[in-house]
């Protein structure tokens, strides 16, 4: 009588696991490269958008910038002078 073999042999099981691991690694590597390239592109765009050169032609430009900075609060609202809230 012949023995009816059922299921996988150990070699076949190991080969299937190796093939699944290779496919998983290739997919992970492709995903990692995609997200890394997006991050690099976003960083380059941010640097391009924020890199602006300020040109100062005269002392009047500095005075104007100084007065603007002194008259603007951190939240963007205008204030004429330091108020009594800052008196210690």
Image (spheres, rainbow, N blue to C red):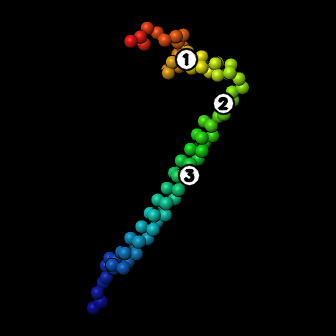
- How packed mark 1 is, by other alpha carbons closer than 10 Å (few <14, some 14-19, many 20 or more), is some
Distance from disc 2 to disc 3, alpha carbons, whole Å, reads: 31 Å
Secondary structure under the numbered disc 1 in the rendered image: helix
- The residue where tag 3 is placed is 37
Q: Nearer the viewer's eye, disc 3 or disc 1?
A: 1
Instruction: Determine the residue positioned at 63% across, 40% down.
Output: 48
Per the rendering, the mark at residue 24 is none
Quarter of the image for residue 16 reads: bottom left
Reply above or below: 33 against 44. below
Dot placed on the residue nearer the N-terminal end, 3 or 1: 3
Asked whether, in this view, residue 34 is left or right of residue 11, the answer is right
Camera-side mark, 2 or 3:
2
From the image, tell me which residue sits under label 2. 54
- Residue lying furthest front: 59
Q: Residue at x 69, y 27 (%)?
A: 56
Q: Which residue is mark 1?
A: 70
Residue placed farthest to the bottom in the image? 1
């Amino acid at each position: 009588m012949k023995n009816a073999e059922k299921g996988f042999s150990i070699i076949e099981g190991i080969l299937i696991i190796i093939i699944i691991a290779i496919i998983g690694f290739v997919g992970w590597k492709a995903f990692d490269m995609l997200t890394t390239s997006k991050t690099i592109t976003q960083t380059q765009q941010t640097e391009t958008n924020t890199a602006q050169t300020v040109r100062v032609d005269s002392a009047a430009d500095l005075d104007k910038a100084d007065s603007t900075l002194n008259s603007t609060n951190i939240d963007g609202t205008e204030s004429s002078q330091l108020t009594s809230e800052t008196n210690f």
